[in-house]
Image (cartoon, rainbow, N blue to C red):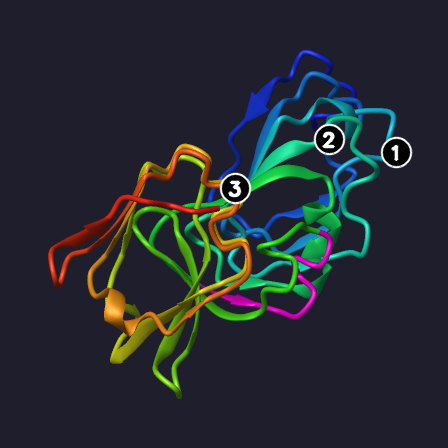
Amino acid sequence: LFYQDTSLQSIRLPENMPLTFNHTFSGNDALTELRVPAGTKSIQNFTNSDTEGISKSLVRLVYDARDATISEEPIHAAQTPFTLVIGANVDVLPTNFAGIVRFNSYIEFEPNNQITIEPGAFSTATEPLASVSGTAWVDDQGILYTYDADLGTATVVNIPANVEVARIPAAIEPEDGVECTVTAIGPEAGRYAEIMTSIEFEDASLITSIDRKAFANCTSLTSVTDKKTDSTETTIEG
C-alpha cells in the first residue's frame, strides 16, 4: 500500500486492527515518525534493507503494541538513531524487542502503564535499561519502576529527560490490590535527567539503597527534599 511512496512523512494506522508489518515501509524515504498501534500482532521487518525507507529517515518510533511477536531483526541498520517511545497500551515487551531497541538514540515511556518486560528485551540498550526485566510500572511523570509484588518493594529505574522535579512516592500501586514500597534507586537511574533540578521523596527514610552513579549525570540537580520531615539537602555531590 505504501511501497515506494517517497513523499510519505507520517502515518496514523488504526489502533485496534490486527496488523502485520512485513517490509511495509520499504521505499518510504521521507517517513520520519511511525506509531505501531495497539492491535499489532506481528512485526517481521519494516523495510527490505538498510539503505531505504525508515532505515534512513526515521526520527521517532512510538511502539504501542499490546503484545506483538517480533522477528530477530525487525529493523535493518538505521543510518540515524531515533527516539523510541514505549506506549501506554503496551502489556508485554518480548525478548526480540531488542532488535528495535538497538537503533534508538533515547528511550522514553508514556505515563501510567504496567508492563511485563521479558529478559533481554532491552539488552541492546545502554544503562539504566540494559538489564531491566520483570514487572514494571510507569508513573504519571514517565518515571519507570520495577517491582516485586510478593516482596512489596519497588525500585526507581529510569527518570526521563523531560522531568525537572522528580517526585518519588512512598509506594506505587501498579496493579489492583498491589502496593509496593519504593525502597531503592537503581544504577544510573538519572542518566538522562540532565534538566532535573530537584528530587522530592514522599518519605526518604524508606529508601534503603541508592545504587552506583544513580545521579551522576544530573548536572542541574541542586536539592533533595524529604516531604515527610520537610527537610531539604542543597549540597549535591556527583
Which residue is identified by label 1? 49
> Residue placed at 32% from the left, 45% from the top?
235
Residue 16 picture location, percent across and down: 47, 49
Which secondary structure is most common in the magenta stretch?
loop
Q: Secondary structure at mark 3?
A: loop
Please say whether residue 75 is one of the residues in the magenta stretch.
no
Q: Residue furthest top?
A: 7
> Residue placed at 81% from the left, 56% from the top?
72
- Mark carried by residue 155: none
Amino acid at dot 3: Asn
**Which of the pair 146/206 is nearer the observer?**
206
Asked which quadrant contains residue 206, the reply is: bottom left
Residue 60 picture location, percent across and down: 58, 30
**Which of the pair 203/158 is nearer the observer?**
203
Q: Is residue 175 visible?
A: no
- Mark carried by residue 25: 2
- In the image, is 114 to the left or to the right of 141? right
Find the distance from the CA under tag 2 to the CA under tag 1. Answer: 11 Å
Which residue is identified by label 3? 217
Q: Which residues are magenta?
A: 115-124
- In the image, is 190 to the left or to the right of 69? left
